[in-house]
Image (cartoon, grey):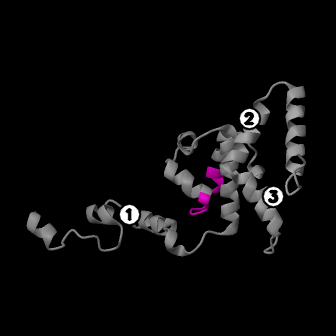
């Protein structure tokens, strides 16, 4: 047995490692694996948009990728790939995600820029909204039960934000 391994008898011939050696995959499964490989070029912008919306909603609910994966029956690595747009999410899986994240399926398609031309200011604002600290601030803000305090904090943030670039008066 050792000699046949050394000669390369069990070496993978089609790039799918132990599965090909063991003969465990059927032709259809191999084709599915090939379609999921990342070597097919960059992800489509729409897949990236849906992934960003999944990440946004997951962060709003305070779920980890593992938690979401457990709810929809996939690994956290699959959730990572859905969120990055590396693999496309099927309609049935998107429905499961929408149920797990308590959002309508249309939520994941909202705010998609219709054309190829993008407003760079809008892209920067969208990037700011996707940052972890922004989501943490929003979650904390909505965690405040006192509406008067919520209003005061919002006014304070608005005043501090309007000071950007203005000279400080001492």
Residue at image position (69%, 68%) is: 45
Q: Nearer the viewer, residue 2 or 155?
A: 155
Question: Residue 62's quadrant in the figure?
Answer: top right
Q: Please tell me whether mark 3 sits on a helix, a strand or a loop.
A: loop
Q: Which residue is mark 1?
A: 26
Residue 106, label in figure: none
**Residue 43 location in percent, x, y?**
61, 69
Q: Which residue is mark 3?
A: 111
- In the picture provided, is 73 more to the left or to the right than 55? left
Tell which circle, 2 or 3, labels the residue nearer the N-terminal end.
3
Give the residues in magenta.
84-94
Among the 4 quarters of the image, the one containing residue 96? top right
> Can you see residue 112?
no
Residue bearing the label numbered 2:
140
Percent coordinates x, y for residue 81 in the rendering: 55, 58
Residue 20 as seen in the image, left or right of residue 45 = left
Q: Nearer the viewer, mark 1 or mark 2?
A: 2
Is disc 1 surrounded by few (<14), some (14 to 19) or many (20+) residues within 10 Å?
few
155 vs 137, left or right, is right
- Horizontal side, residue 108 vs residue 19: left or right: right
Q: Quadrant where the N terminus lies?
A: bottom left
Other-residue count near label 3 (Cα within 10 Å), few / some / many at <14 / 14–19 / ≥20: few
Secondary structure beneath disc 1? Answer: loop
């Amino acid at each position: 047995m050792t000699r046949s391994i050394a000669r390369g008898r069990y070496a993978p011939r089609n790039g799918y490692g132990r599965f090909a050696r063991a003969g465990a995959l059927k032709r259809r499964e191999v084709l599915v694996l090939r379609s999921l490989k990342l070597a097919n070029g960059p992800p489509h912008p729409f897949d990236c948009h849906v992934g960003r919306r999944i990440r946004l909603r997951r962060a709003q609910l305070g779920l980890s990728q593992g938690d979401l994966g457990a709810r929809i029956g996939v690994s956290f690595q699959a959730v990572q790939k859905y969120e990055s747009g590396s693999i496309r999410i099927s309609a049935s899986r998107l429905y499961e995600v929408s149920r797990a994240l308590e959002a309508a399926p249309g939520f994941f398609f909202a705010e998609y820029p219709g054309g190829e031309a993008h407003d760079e200011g809008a892209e920067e604002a969208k990037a700011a909204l996707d940052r972890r600290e922004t989501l943490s601030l929003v979650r904390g803000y909505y965690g405040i039960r006192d509406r008067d305090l919520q209003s005061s904090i919002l006014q304070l943030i608005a005043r501090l934000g309007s000071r950007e670039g203005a000279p400080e008066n001492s």
